[in-house]
Structure formats: C-alpha cells, structure tokens
Image (cartoon, rainbow, N blue to C red):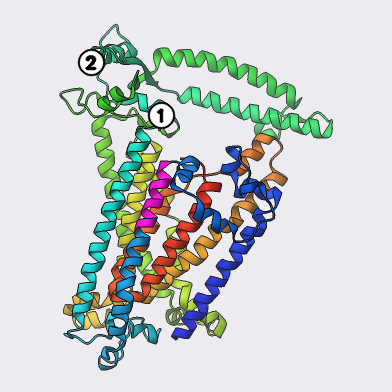
Amino acid sequence: MEFSSFLTSLGTSFILFILLMLLFAWLSAKPGNAVVYYPNRILKGLEPCEGGSRTRNPFSWIREALSSTEQDVINMSGVDTAVYFVFLSTVLGVLVLSGIVLLPVLLPIAATDDGLRKNGNTTTSKGTFNDLDKLSMANIEEKSPKLWAFLIAVYWVSVVTYVLSWKAYKHVSALRANALMSSEVRPEQFAVLVQDLPDVAPGRTRKDQVDSYFKSIYPDTFYRSLVVTNNKKVDKIWGELEGYRKKLARAEAIYEGSSTRPTNKTGFLGLCGKQVDSIEYYNEKIKELTQKLEAEQKVTLREKQLGSALVFFTDRVTAALAAQSLHAQMVDKWTVKEAPEPRQLIWSNLTIKFFERIVRQYIVYVVVFLTIVFYIIPIGFISAITTLENLRKLFPFLKPIVDRVEIKTVLEAYLPQLALIIFLALLPMFLLFLSKMEGIPSGSHVIRAASGKYFYFSVLNVFIGVTIGGTLFRTMKSIEKDPNSLVPLLAKSLPVNATFFLTFVALKFFVGYGLELSRIVPLIIYHLKRKYLCKTEAEIREAWFPGDISYATRVPNDMLVITIVLCYSVIAPVIIPFGVLYFALGWLVLRNQVTHHFLTL
C-alpha cells in the first residue's frame, strides 16, 4: 500500500469520527436520551444541557469543554480526574514542544538523504508507505554526520519531558494539598485502618483491646473504634432481603399499571410450587428476613469480631499522624494506614494477615510474569499472521475478498492493530482479579495496582512483543543460517515497525474516541433495558446510572501511546502529529465526558 492509500484510510477514519460526533450531537439533544449523555449533571440537579437549550449547535460541546475550568472538573468528577487532566496536558505539551523542533529539522534532513536506495530499498514499513520511509531515520546513510541531528533531538525530547514532568508534579502536589486542606471534610479524614491486631487476652473483647490501646496513645483525640466482623451470613440475608424488596416494588408497579394483582410460584426459579399473590408473599418474606437479619447482626457484633478495625479521632491532624506512625515494635502487629473511603473498602481483605499479604503479593507477581511471558506468544502470532500476505498463505479462500481494492486498503492499514486491540480487551478483568487477590484493602488501590500491571503488560507485549515477534517471524530463516545476526536484526526492527504503531495510534484516537463520545452501545443497552426489563423507577435509574472513568485501562493505554510516540519521535518524527491528535482529542472528549457523564470518584 502506497502513501496515498494510507491517507485514504486515515481520511476514512476521520470521516467516521466526524459522523460519530454528529450522531452524538443529534442523539444527545433528544429528551429521552439525556440520562445517557448527561447523568452526572442530572444527579447534581443541573440542566442536562448548559443554558437549558435542547437545540444546540452540533459542535457546542467543544466550546463547553474548552471553557470548563479545572475547578469545574473537581466539582463534577473529583480531584483524581483533575490530576488525570494534568497528565493529559503535560503529555500534550511534551509532544507539541518536541514536534516544533523535530518536525521542521529532522524531516528535511531525512528526506534529503538517500540511504534507502543505497541500502537496497529496505524500508521502514516492510515494502509499503514508500514516501513515509523517506521521512524517517532509516533514510540516513550509516555513519552519516546527519545522525548527530537525531542524537541531539533525543536530548531535546528528554529535557522537555523532564521540565514539564517537574511542573506537573508541583501542580498535582498543590491539588492534593488543597484537597486535604478543604473546608469540606470527609469521614475517612478522621479515621485510620488498623490491621494485624494481636490475639485478645482472655476475658476481653476485641473492641476493648482496640479502645484501650488507642486511648493510651491518643487520650485527648480518640473518639471510637469499629471492629471488622465476619459478615458473610449477614450479607447473604441482606442480599435476599434487597432482592425481595426489588421484586415487591416491581410487583406493585405491575399492579398499578394493569390493575391486576400479579402472582408467582414459590418453587424453583418460579417455575413450580404453590401459586401465591406476589405482593402478599413478598411482604411476608421481607418481614421474615428483617427479623432474621436483626438477630444475625446482634450475633455477629458479639461473636464474630475479626483482627482489624477502623479507629476514629476527633480531628484530622491526629488521624494523619496516626496513619504515618509506627504503633508496635514488630512490623506484623498493629499495622496502621490511612482509611479508604467507605465505598472503597474491600471488607474481605481487611483481615488478611501481614505475612499472608506478602506471600499473596509474590504469588500474584509470579502469575503476572507468566501471563506476560505466555501472552507474548499469541500477541506475536497475531501481529505476524494478520498481514495480507500471511492471510493469503494461511487462508487461500480469502484471496477474492482481501484482493478487492477498497477492502485491501482498509485491511492493510488497520487489521493487525484492530486484532491487537480486541485481543488486549480480554485482559483487564483478570488483572483486577489478581490485584484484589493480593489482599489490598481498598478498591481504588486495586485499580491502581491493576493499572500498573496492565501498563507493564502492554509495553512488554504490545510494544516490545510486536517488534520482536514480527521480526522473528519474518527473519526466522536468516537467524537459522546465522544465529549471530539476531541482535542486529532486533536492533533494526524498531524502524521496521514504525508504520504499524502509527496506524495503531490513529485507530485508537479516531475510532476509539468517536465511539466513546457517541455512546452508542450504552444508549442501545439503556433503551433495551427500559423497554423490556425495567418496571420501577429504581430499575430505570440503575439502567442509566453513570460508571467511573475506568482508570485501570485508560491510564495504561495512554501510557502505552506516549511510550510508542516518544520512542519513535526521533526515529520517525511523522508520528508526533498523530500523538498530538490522540491526546488533544482525548483531552477534549474526556473533558466533555467527565463534566456530563462519569460519576464523581
């Protein structure tokens, strides 16, 4: 595929993004869709559209996003989201400042050399994108003095990255300090989480042990303690009780709409057993389970206290000092840390002992390592076989399809990248599960841990794996003949894969952000649920209730893109504008999403 074909594919992606943006403007203006596109504003009692107008310009969301301030983001979606925008702005600044120097300097230097022709026309893109090849470092002759320009460019990109990262660090530190000093207090600021409690002396309760210990250390500021209990049985009863309450609300809604009292069978899955009046039956079950729950709660509080607790103080300063202080000579006793938000606590992990947490952590690290190592095999296989040449060899029956000009253009540009993106979408839930198994006590910390694992996985498998896997697949015969050529071949594989990653980035920002902005899938799911499943207001609210910003996958994906763009910014500077577009569109789309859609973190 020549450069013109690449531009055609890129133009197609851009047109698709514009169509998705227009679709968003049209769908979001319809009153029935407001809960899908503006749930965060609705929950806060604001008008879905700023100014209350439903007949808006299709591009007015861009103006609203650009005019929103950092404080608006904090008010609507929290400090974490504001920090994320500092990251996006910093990366965008790094790429813009790098591109201002690298594009006008390195591109002419590369274009005016003749290294490709003299080296036998070994291009950076496996025989494709011939015009792009002339704009990369691969077109520079070996030992040419022009290579000094590329070396100096590396230092320029490094200095820009260091300076802007330092400024971002100071900005984020200020945001955190302002949040901690805010007059708006939160319960967790007055509490600490205490784990690894020692055995209780005979005749004493766990609560007496915790209260007396912290009263002796903080006699003036200790308020009370809440000992963690084994709530498995209570949670089971509570789940059943909530289930019957929902069924009762649903039955009452059906009765109100049809004037006919609903009935159901009491047997397995409502398919067999005695036919009863649903409203009366559910009321009886709720009354029965409420009494059972109250009795079980008393037993749990008295007999099922576990080895961890939440300790509350009368001021925030004492809580902060306690979270940073050592409370016992042995590291595995009286472990004190900052208390997470109540909704972030993972209660099942609070009672895991110190050394068990360490063992779990190392086991998870080994599992993640093995996952990375063995995942690189299918990743490399996908990157190798999803080229048209290999598809023709492996699946001859596809030749009539892939040889059609309009299909061939799109497949050559995006098939390997699309296959890779879909393959990677299977991983995050597994990494979240592993992070939770480490014994981490809070949901936000689990997300952070999974995010780190996903980033390392992406870099090693996508960035390095595609490069090495593709090189080994193409040059296996050469390596068999001359094993010593492995290192030089791998060294040359970076520029060989430049255009793969260029289209990888383009696909992510045009198609990915277009789909995120349009919210077509959530919209379809909401309307299907509302029409066929939801009978009560609570069920309808649950169907459109906003989710979070998905840091576990969003941040690692952004980090992968900036890693790719920074790596190739000097080798093939033409990738820089694509990186700028990715983070500029990301900033714009996410600014709209966090002020209208995503739930406050």
Of circles 2 and 1, the one toward us is 1
Q: Nearer the viewer, residue 447 or 221?
A: 221
Whether residue 488 can be seen here: yes
Residue under the point 31% across and 15% down: 222
* Element assignment for label 1: loop
- Compared with 518, 510 (above or below) is below
Magenta stretch: dominant secondary structure: helix
Is 585 colored magenta in this rendering? no
Q: Nearer the viewer, residue 76 or 187?
A: 76
- Residue 89: horizontal and vertical position, in percent? 38, 56
- Compared with 122, 317 (above or below) is above
Determine which of the numbered discs, if any, sits on residue 385 in the image.
none
- Residue 467: horizontal and vertical position, in percent? 31, 71
- Residue 346: horizontal and vertical position, in percent? 40, 33
- Residue 571: horizontal and vertical position, in percent? 28, 75
Give the mark nearest the N terminus, 2 or 1. Answer: 1
Determine which of the numbered discs, if any, sits on residue 217 in the image.
2
Left or right, residue 196 beside residue 6: left
**Residue type at the position of mark 1:** Ser
Left or right, residue 122 beside residue 130: left
Quarter of the figure with the N terminus: bottom left
Residue under the point 30% across and 74% down: 102
Does the residue at mark 2 contact the one at mark 1 (Cβ under 8 Å)? no
